[in-house]
Image: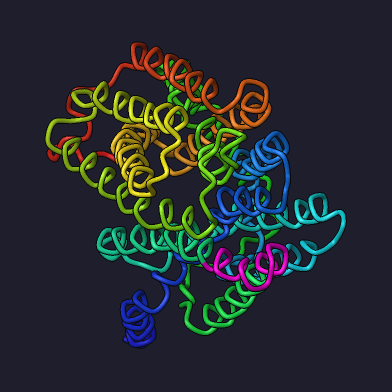
Amino acid sequence: MSNSNIEQPERTVSRRQPWLWIPSLYFAEGIPYVVVMTVAVIMYKKLGVSNTDIALYTSWLYLPWVIKPFWSPLVDVLKTKRWWIVAMQLLIGAGMAGVALTIPTSNFLQYSLAFLWLLAFSSATHDIAADGFYMLGLTSHEQTWFVGIRSTFYRLAMISGQGLLVMFAGYFEKSLGVTSAWALTFYVLAGLFIGLLVYHGLVLPKPAEDRSQAATSFASVLTEFLKTFESFFAKKQIIPVLAFLLFYRFAEAQLVKMASLFLLDERQAGGLELSTTQVGFVYGTIGVVMLTLGGILGGLVAARQGLKFWLWWMVLAINLPNVVYVALSFSQPESTLAVNLAVAVEQFGYGFGFTAYMLLMLYASQGEHETAHYAICTGFMALGMMLPGMASGWLQTQIGYQNFFIWVMIATIPSFAVCWFVSIDAEFGKDAHRGETP
């Protein structure tokens, strides 16, 4: 009787609190990722860094997400996931402040990149802790119910980062100058994360299951960790799956690094010479909205007829709309409406086509250790984005925007090729089958 009385209030508190922390936690998860992957690209362009260096160095920042599965056992063993969340938000805030401090210096590229590395590793670790805490802090029913909420607020972080944040910097570029405007933007981000860590330190629940394991358990955790890798690479069709993970987004990985630079670059260099504010609007609002709509539609149709039925339509959707950049580079339209429409088409296609990638990762992760196997898949996803992206800036500099976007269309061929070799259960993804997926 006594135990029941003790446990019940804890469970009641846990059920009352999710609305207090899930939205803010997943907003906090999305912001540093979009800052590292997108905002930093725009910032460096405005600060005069070459396209070659921007693509190379910002692509390297994918590395923490590539190797994230390798240190995830440490997050399970050392401290609580609640502790990791708050600690990583402190480091993320420190990284933001470090970028702000170094932007005005003469060696800003080297120094700011060092802090972006801190930001990237802290963000990847925060992802591990937040996703683990989500499962510990909620019942299975609550986890299902709130999955849409966490996704929504992660996407809001994308809009805030790619859109509002870039527009904020663009607004102050006019009055403060480029350097001061971007320093101010990162100071604001640092303040945001200090506020978030204080807030989460107060409102995050303390589930009984969220506890650090004894140091003696590390050997057993490591053994289990190695078993998960062994079982992953022993899966049937693992070679076609890995090829899919690495090459399905081969063209997109190159395009994503150059697209915003193309919009910002001078017309004499082949770009469209949009302002920072205009780029923030097109990618952060229209782009994200169309990306979301494409993803929703992709999920709906896959649930009706399965991934296998829609796979070829999705690979077409993620690749063929890239042709809009070929058209933009040759026509260099003055109208921002034309640019907005082109980006809307490309992002909608990307959202729809990316559904196949997400479902394939779920399909490849089925069975024992599905959570760990999914994390390994995300590592390969990051690797597939990192390697092609590194050379994209150099290639564009050598051949110009027009030829680069033509090359991007040629680079879609591996995406189609890998789809031939992946064998997918015709029922996977359908409503009747969804209960069997992670």
**Rendering coords of residue 428 (x, y %):** 22, 30
Q: Is residue 16 visible?
A: yes
Please give the name of the residue rendered at 47% of the width and 20% of the height, measured from the top-left corner. 406
Residue pictured at 51% horizontal, 50% vertical: 274
Q: Nearer the viewer, residue 92 or 230?
A: 92
**Number of numbered labels in the structure image:** 0
The reply, left or right, for residue 376 in relation to residue 285 is right
Q: Which quarter of the picture shows residue 223?
A: top right
Which quadrant is the C terminus positioned in?
top left
Q: State the scheme by which the image is colored.
A: rainbow
Q: Name the residue at 46% across, 60% down.
A: 163
Q: Percent x, y for residue 138?
A: 36, 67
Q: Nearer the viewer, residue 104 or 235?
A: 104
Residue 311 located left or right of residue 216: left
Task: Between residue 277 and residue 86, name the one nearer to us.
Answer: 277
Q: Quadrant of the N terminus?
A: bottom left
Where does the image place residue 234, in percent across and percent down from the top left? 49, 21
Q: Is residue 188 above or below residue 284?
A: below
Q: Is residue 144 above or below residue 383?
A: below
Q: Is residue 311 magenta?
A: no
In this rendering, position of residue 305 left or right of residue 209: left
Our reading of the magenta stretch's main secondary structure is helix
Residue 186: image x %, image y %? Answer: 65, 67
Quadrant for residue 229, please give it.
top right
Could you tell me if residue 227 is visible in this image?
A: no
Q: Residue drawn 56% across and 63% down?
A: 170
Front-most of 75 and 406?
A: 406
**Range drawn in magenta:** 168-183
Q: Is residue 171 magenta?
A: yes
46 relative to 263 in the view: left or right = right
